[in-house]
Image (cartoon, helix red, strand yellow):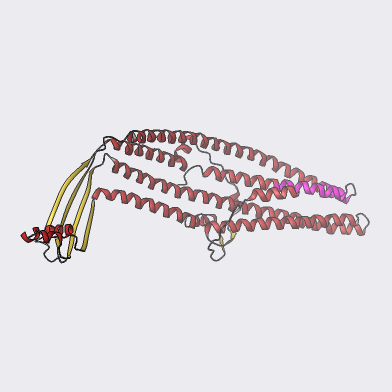
Amino acid sequence: MNKIISLIILTIFSIHSMADATITTPTKMKLDELLSLVQKSKIVQMAEFERQMSLFKHKEIKALDYGKLDLKIQGLTTNHSGAVFTMKLNERVIQGSDFAIAGINNPDSRESYESKITFSLPLYTGGKISSYKKITKKLVAISNLSKKDMINQKSYEVKKGFYSIILLKNLITQITNIKTNTLFLRESVKQMRIEGYATKTDILLLDARIAEMDSLVHQLQTNKELIFHFISFLTSTKVTDISYDDSMIDIRFNDILDSDILTQNIDIQKANKAIEIKREQLSISRSGYLPQIGLMAEYGSNDEKLFKNFHDHDYYIVGVGASWNIFSGGATLNNTERSKVDLLKQQTTLSYAKEGLLLKADDIRTKIKNLNYKLNALAKEQEYKKEIFENFKESHKEQRASMNDVLLHQSHYIQTVMKIEENQNLKFTEIFKFQTLIEDK
C-alpha cells in the first residue's frame, strides 16, 4: 500500500520549484476566479512588459519615415589660427587686415557660437526600412502570442492543481469513511472478544490498520496543502480552499481536428511569424545591392556672441546625397545566401514542429482513451472488491475467516479506490494538456 500512496502523491501533483510570492488575505475561490487572477499574475505581467517593449521598438522604426530634426548650439574659445580665421569667415566679418601675416599667424583669442537646426530624411533605402518595419510589427505579434501562451500554460497548471485538490478531497473523504467503518468493526470485534469469538490480535490488527489510514490521510492532507501553496504562487493570492460542485468532476474530452490544431496552436503561429521575419531579413540582405538616397537640410548662424546678429549671419544648406556600394568582396552575396539558408532552416523547423505537434495530439488522445478504459474497469473492480470485503467481514463474524483475511481484502479495496483517483487525475491532466495545444480564445 505504501507504494500506491507514494505513487498517488507523486502523480497528483509535482512541484519542482517555488519562488516567494506576494500573498494577500486567505481566500476560498472558484476556478473561474483563479483563472482570472492568472492573467494578472507577475509572470504574465512580465510577458506584457515584453510585449510593450516590442511595440516601442516598432514605433521607433516607424519614426524613420518622418526624418530626424536636430538642434545644435555650441560655443568655442580658441587662439588657433585656422579656427579663428574660420570663425570670422563663418560669421562674415572677414576684413582685409585679417589676411596680414601677423593677423593670420598670431590671432587674438576669439569666441564663436554656432546655432543650427538640421533635418535629414532617408528617401530610398532599397526597401530596408520597410522590411525593418514589417519585422518589428511581426515581433509585436509574436510577443502577443507569447503572452497568450504564458496565460495558457499557467491556466493549465491552475486547472490541474484545482482538480487535483478536488480528487484529494474526495479521496480523503473515502478513506475517512473507511476508517469510520473500521472503528465500528473494532467495536464489534471487542464485543466478540468478550464472548470468546475474537482475539486480542484481531483488535491489534485493526488498531494497526486505523493508524495506517490516519497516516495516509495525513499524507494526502499535506499534499493538498502543497498544491494550495503552488496555486497561491501562480495567482499571488493566498488560496486556502476552493469552491466547486460535484458536477465539475464530469469533464468531457472535446477533441478537435488536426487541421484546427495546426492553425490554432500558438507555437505554430509564432513559427509562421518567424518565417515571415526571415523573408524580410532576406530582403534586407538583398538591399545591399541597391543605392541609399537621403535628403539633408540645415539652417543656422554663427556669431561672436550667442544670437547677437543671428539673421545677418544666417545660412542654409539643402542637399540630396546617394551612396552605392559597388564592391564588398562578396560580403553582400554571402549575407544574401546566408539569409536564404536561414529561411529554409526555419521552414524545415516549422514542418518538423507540425509533425511533432500532431504526434503529441495523437499521444494525448491515445492516453485519454486508455485511461477511460482503465477507469471503467477499476469502477467494476472497486464494486467487486467492496463486496468481497463485506463478505469476509460477515465470514469473520461467523468465525469462517481470520481478521488477516478481512484486512487483506480491505487493503485491496482501498488500493482500488486510490487507483481510481490516481487515474482520474491522470485523465484530467491529459485533457488540460490537450487544451494547451490550441490558443485559448
Camera-side residue: 155 or 281?
281
Camera-side residue: 247 or 291?
291
**Range shown magenta:** 391-418
- Identify the residue shown where x is 64% and y is 50%: 12
- Identify the residue shown where x is 54% and y is 35%: 359
Q: Position of residue 13 (x, y in %)?
A: 62, 51
Is 184 placed left or right of 99 in the picture?
right
Q: Position of residue 138 (x, y in %)?
A: 37, 44
Q: Is residue 410 magenta?
A: yes
Image quarter for residue 374? top right
Q: Is residue 245 magenta?
A: no
Examine the rendered structure and indicate whether residue 338 appears above or below residue 27: above
Image quarter for residue 127? top left
Camera-side residue: 74 or 45?
74
Q: Position of residue 368 (x, y in %)?
A: 60, 40
Examine the rendered structure and indicate whether residue 119 appears above or below residue 112: above
- Identify the residue shown where x is 71% and y is 50%: 6
- Identify the residue shown where x is 89% and y is 46%: 400
Camera-side residue: 397 or 279?
279
